[in-house]
Amino acid sequence: MSDKAKDARERLVDALDSARTTCKRLEEKAIDSAKATDKVVREHPYQFIGGALAVGLLIGVLVNRK
């Protein structure tokens, strides 16, 4: 292979490693956020039911407006 091809391949490998690291970090952050959300919802279920009802009602009113 030529030097340009080797350099391009090295840059590609580095970019892929960086992307994998970023993806793994985002996945861990998403899992932690989901666990925290689950904990809060389990501690305050009625408040979240009321909030979901209010958001659903608001969306329904906005969709049916003319």
Image: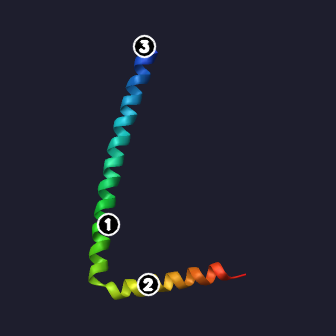
**Residue drawn at x 34%, y 42% as measured from the top left:** 20
Residue 54 placement (x, y as % from top left): 49, 86
Front residue (pair 60, 40): 60
Q: Residue at x 26, y 82 (%)?
A: 43
Q: Amino acid at mark 3?
A: Asp
Q: Which mark is residue 51?
A: 2
The residue at the point 28 percent across, 63 percent down is 32
Residue at which label 1 appears: 34
Image quadrant holding the C terminus, namely bottom right
10 Å neighbourhood of mark 2: few (<14), some, or many (≥20)? Answer: few
Labelled disc at residue 15: none
Q: Where is residue 30 shown, x and y percent of the image? A: 34, 60
Where is 35 relative to 54, above or below?
A: above
Q: Is residue 58 left or right of residue 23?
A: right
Q: Is residue 27 above or below residue 37?
A: above
Q: CA distance from mark 1 to mark 3?
A: 46 Å
* 64 to 18, vertically: above or below: below
**Which quadrant would residue 48 be assigned to in this image?**
bottom left
The residue at which mark 3 appears reads as 3
Disc 1 residue type (three-letter): Ala
Would you say 7 lies left or right of 37 here?
A: right
Of callouts 2 and 3, the N-terminal one? 3
Quarter of the image where the N terminus is located: top left
